[in-house]
Amino acid sequence: MTDAHTAGPFIAAIDQGTTSSRCIVFDKDGRIVSVDQKEHEQIFPKPGWVEHNANEIWTNVQEVVAGAIQKAGITSADIKAIGITNQRETTVLWDKNTGEPVHNAIVWQDTRTDALCKELGRNVGQDRFRRETGLPLASYFAGPKARWLLDNVDGLQERAEAGDILFGTMDTWVIWNLTGGVNGGKHVTDVTNASRTLLMNLHTTQWDEKIAESIGVPLQILPEIRSSAEVYGEVSGGKLGDLLGGIPVASALGDQQAALFGQCCFSEGEVKSTYGTGTFMVMNTGDKIINSYAGLLTTVGYKIGDQPTVFALEGSIAVTGSLVQWMRDQMGLISTAAEIETLALSVEDNGGAYFVPAFSGLFAPHWRSDARGVIAGLTRYVTKAHLARAVLEATAWQTREIADAMVKDSGDELVALKVDGGMTANNLLMQQLADVLDAPVVRPMVAETTCLGAAYAAGLAVGFWSSTDELRANWRRAAEWTPRMDAETRDREYKNWLKAVDRTMGWIDDDES
Ligand SMILES: Nc1ncnc2c1ncn2[C@@H]1O[C@H](COP(=O)(O)OP(=O)(O)O)[C@@H](O)[C@H]1O
Ligand SMILES: O=P(O)(O)OC[C@H](O)CO
């Protein structure tokens, strides 16, 4: 509910995430006025495959937007713009005449395009993709997922060539539906989302015709690439037509880039790390496209209207919060995510156990699709409490590996790490992070930085906020953890972690992928 401190007008931000969709209404000071959230089904048709129902997602998005506005007790006249942020890479193709998806969306964690990526590597070469798109060839990215759909849905290639099929990541799907769907919905994406497809040339920030041709994705299915902060269209039709018709849809950023923006990492060298299903550490590299030699991704940070594109380096970790979910849902060792902390605190250390959750291979900095999870160092001494500790340490050590890669690639030391996301509620994990990084870890007042970043970008696009300097003034520290681990322990534990990582490699044979 609004109160005296949260007078309108407001900006609403939609975060279409991996496990849920949420909408948050923010006031001018960047404070949360209301939140609504709804989970969607995770569909696992085969080992390594992960799908979402795009219709369910669109229904949930409409519900949470209506829910957040109702909880805020405001009317559409109070909302100046809507911003979008989204799980990245997750790919949906749909029929532009009916609005019906042709298949479930293929989620970023899905590994079904492994063999296709290996074949592309042999035929086109890894280096070419790295050089032009900033990305390694991996099943993580959207382009090969689109190719898989074109190959595996009956008659789809012909329909795509006939101009009946549209491609989108979740930003595109939500914007198209929000702005009218079959009745003139805008088919657009922003430059951050486009930079995760393996189809966009990082140097031109446009689709790369030759690369698209080599993957086999027809250009006519691709959306127009726009900046991250501009008016793409207005809300029209759907369940939201009556409620919010005419409100500008004014930003889109991939969720990790939105978090970079929401954390006010506007200067070159500033870094944030978001701890959710996976973990994503992103460094603002200004106007520099830094080629990574240490296993990071080169990507777009954001682009505000017609201002120059800001680039970034990213370390992506596939499994962090989802390991906690796995302990809860598959193993039944805890009954809530928060319980992992209580269980881990019941022992002093990991009892010699190291858990490397390479459930979908290893992402940065290794990029090894043949890796699978291991628990190393087991003896009969190890209890479920030690495992809980190893689960949290897995997130901390994976972060350390990324931080090392970032220092190598950028030449900048890590001075402090700004953190956000669901896992930052875990104080033990935050302390472990400070310990293994040997750097302070800082959490802001508004930990919902993903939605905040989308709101900020939308607000800048419609003049609700005037500049990034104004936004910086909203950033406030809520908590800070400083390193307490001695160097000898840190070095010994890191060495053990790396030994455990080594043991995940090569589990999947070539003919199994
Ligand atoms: N107290 C906690 N300790 C450890 N992990 C947690 C805790 N609370 C939530 N999580 C994990 O954080 C994730 C949810 O964070 P969130 O930022 O909402 O994720 P996403 O945006 O990826 O859906 C879940 O994977 C959950 O297991
Ligand atoms: O929805 P999240 O927070 O798990 O983020 C997913 C990432 O965008 C995948 O690249």
Image: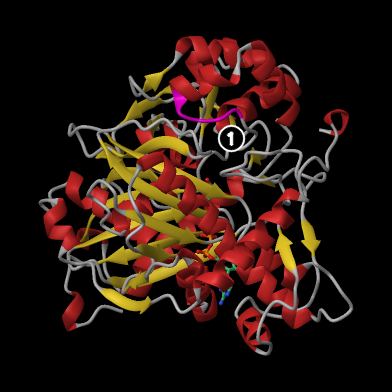
Residue stretch rendered in magenta on the structure: 133-137
Q: Quadrant of the C terminus?
A: top right
Quadrant of res 287: top left
Residue 439 in the image: state x and y as whole percent.
Answer: 39, 67
Image-quarter location of ligand 1: bottom right
Residue 159 in the image: state x and y as whole percent.
Answer: 62, 15
Q: Which residue is drawn at 55% across and 65% down?
A: 396
Residue that carries the numbered disc 1 in the rendered image: 92
Q: Quadrant of the N terminus?
A: bottom left
Nearest the camera: 47 or 499? Answer: 499
Q: Which residue is drawn at 68% across and 34% down?
A: 103
Tell how many labels. 1
Nearest the camera: 111 or 79? Answer: 111
Q: Which residue is drawn at 67% across and 90% down?
A: 346
Name, please, the residue furthest toward the bottom.
346
Name, please, the residue furthest toward the front.
488
Is residue 331 placed above or below 401 in the rendered structure? below
Q: Does the magenta stretch include residue 273?
A: no
Quadrant of res 144: top right
